[in-house]
Amino acid sequence: MKISREDVLHVAELAHLELSEGEVQSIQRELDSILTYMEKLGELETSQVEPLAQVLFDAPAQDKPGEEIALREDVAVACALTGEVLAGAPDPSPPYFRVPKVIDR
């Protein structure tokens, strides 16, 4: 796959990056190399490979053979550092603080 200079410049603009001409050429080569490798991976025969839904489930613990990895329950908890974070913010309005706009350009 060939990545064009315009493709690199478009992605750089979306990411708000200013690139030198040398960086544009380097990134163009690197992205082209990555996508070429991905095309090679797409040629592999995988019809007999079972899909993985979750890599961790039913995986044995590395340090304790025969035991499964115990995953903790996902529970939301309040942050104990909110006051400290807001104390360092330039424009706090608890429990939030304002930041400069980055969307408009």
Image (cartoon, rainbow, N blue to C red):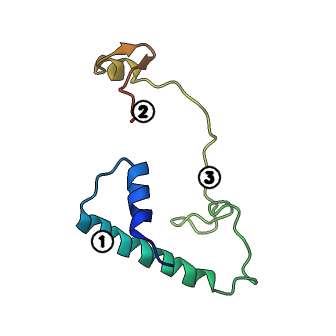
**Residue at mark 1 to residue at mark 2: CA–CA distance:** 29 Å
Task: Give the left or right position of residue 47, taking residue 7 as reference.
Answer: right
Residue at mark 1: 26
Q: Are marks 1 and 2 in contact (CB under 8 Å)?
A: no
Residue 71 position in % (x across, y down) = 61, 50
Question: What secondary structure is marked by label 1?
Answer: helix
Residue at mark 2: 104
Specify the amino acid type for callout 2.
Asp
Specify the amino acid type for callout 1.
Ser
Task: Give the left or right position of residue 57, taking residue 14 as reference.
Answer: right
Residue drawn at x 70%, y 83% as measured from the top left = 46
Q: From the image, state whether disc 3 or disc 1 is nearer to you.
A: 1
Question: What secondary structure is marked by label 2?
Answer: loop
**Residue at mark 3 to residue at mark 2: CA–CA distance:** 45 Å
Which quadrant of the figure contains the C terminus? top left
Q: From the image, state whether disc 3 or disc 2 is nearer to you.
A: 2
Local crowd at mark 2 within 10 Å, few (<14), some, or many (≥20)? few
Local crowd at mark 3 within 10 Å, few (<14), some, or many (≥20)? few
Specify the amino acid type for callout 3.
Ala
Numbered tag placed on residue 70 in the rendering: 3
Instruction: Pick the residue in front: 75 or 61.
Output: 75
Numbered tag placed on residue 40 in the rendering: none
Which mark is first along the chain, 2 or 3? Answer: 3
Residue 79 position in % (x across, y down) = 46, 25
Residue 43 position in % (x across, y down) = 63, 86
Q: Quadrant of residue 92?
A: top left
Q: Quadrant of residue 58?
A: bottom right
